[in-house]
Image (cartoon, rainbow, N blue to C red):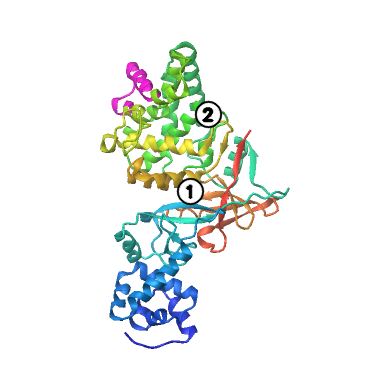
Amino acid sequence: MVNRYFPVRVIQNMINSEGLCKPIKEQGLLLQLLDGKLSPTDEHKVLTHLRTCPECLGLTADLLYTDDRLKELFSRQDEQKEKPKRKDTDQFMLEIDKLPIGKSMDRDLLDEDGKLLVSAGTELTPILIESLKRRGIEKLAIETPRLAEQAGPEEVDSLVINIYQIESFLAENGITPAVSAYVRRQCSEALDTCFRNLEENGVADVRQLQEAAQELTEEILANTQIALTLADLILVDPGLHAHSVNVMILFLMIARAMGHPVKLIRDHSTAALLHDIGRIILRAVDQKKTQEEIEFEHSEAGYNYLWNMGSVNESALKMVMNHHEQYDGNGYPRKIKGTMLSDWDQILILSNTYDNLTWNKQTGVRSGFHEALSSIIRVGTKSVRKGIIRMAIQTFGHYPPGSWVKLNSGEIGLVASSHPGNPLKPTITIIYDSAGRKQSKPKFIDLTHSQNTYILGPVSVQMR
């Protein structure tokens, strides 16, 4: 290795170039690091590179005093990074296979303990990704500032709007829902009628419901280029039937993205809609049952009822029985696991979980999409297999089109489209300026092209 020193300007040029391997191997940058000739920022960049590049780290074996000195430097870097997560930040987990290769993130990537793995601005090369995988790293954390609660008439932290306003905003900004409002409501009303008849009379004719379910299914299957939007998941009535329609929509979107045959998707769609019918049956049979008893028994009750009806195929029936099971065997009621759960079972498990995480059924508030998806990623294969989680990320995005977010500039915007390779940086239509005034002419910001603008957090949508 060449033992020479460079002026600060030359060092900066080396560190800011496309990669650090050449400066370390051929231009004496390692000696600059070991002898304390780098600024704290540049030292941090070189140390981070050494952590993830075994080839460059191997060069240090040629230097007698390297071992202890590197331990000292790495230890100092860890002490700076191992601080508890700040209360003013939220942490999201990203799968390593979903990182945008060839691009760089505008924030540090950490491990699950908060240790730095990749510093902000580092290009995510295939070699870097493979190096992280060899170390057994499957997920990385990214911290984003939490939306501060500030009082004042100019702050817009919650929007009170109705479904028609949401549809209007989507139409004005060119966002097409996967399901039309008419078909969604028609299916919801048919399911509501079915549930009420079942609860009041003990029987229900599901033929009309099956027709409504098939119409919704055909609309989603026909629009293969349309992504999930907030409007697809909001229904005015926060009852069980609304949750069931949402879960069916999520189920169909994931099944479509996974490329399952259209005929099989059709065969399973009605069962996805009726996955919670056992709750109605148990309430009708015994009104003294506790919520805990209903929760544990409703899957089996729904399965038995639909089996006696004879209008749902066996594979779809198993979905109803298994929609609270888990891939690791810790679900209920039967604690089955792994390959004993079909893809159909697991798609329904994930869809049901996602809708429950994003909707407060008592208040009607819809929010927390990125938190819900991060929670699913964090739980990982304890719940469902990795391929289905990957399709959920692609289908939902951390901020689905039609959801409202607040930027670090103070502006409020509507998510117009998402980028599968960079889920935290969608395209935003700014609706309200930083003073809370509605824009006369909305402007568009693609966050993948904006290094200084980022999302602070979601803005709650209160239905009325």
Mark 1: give few (<14), some (14-19) or many (20+) Cα within 10 Å: many
The residue mark sitting in front, 2 or 1, is: 1
In which quadrant of the rendered view does residue 54 lie? bottom left
Q: Who is closer to the viewer here, 339 or 326?
A: 326
Does residue 196 appear anywhere in the picture?
yes
Q: What amino acid is found at the position of numbered circle 1 in the picture?
A: His
Marks counted in the figure total 2
In the rendered structure, find residue 398 and report the number of the disc placed on it.
1
Q: Who is closer to the viewer here, 16 or 290?
A: 290
Q: Is residue 444 magenta?
A: no
In which quadrant of the rendered view does residue 388 lie? top left
Q: Which residue is mark 2?
A: 185
Q: Residue at x 42, y 64 (%)?
A: 118
Q: Main secondary structure of the magenta part?
A: helix
Does residue 261 appear anywhere in the picture?
no
x then y, percent, for residue 44: 45, 71
* Residue found at the far top of this picture: 201
Q: Residue at x 44, y 69 (%)?
A: 76
Q: What amino acid is found at the position of numbered circle 2 in the picture?
A: Arg
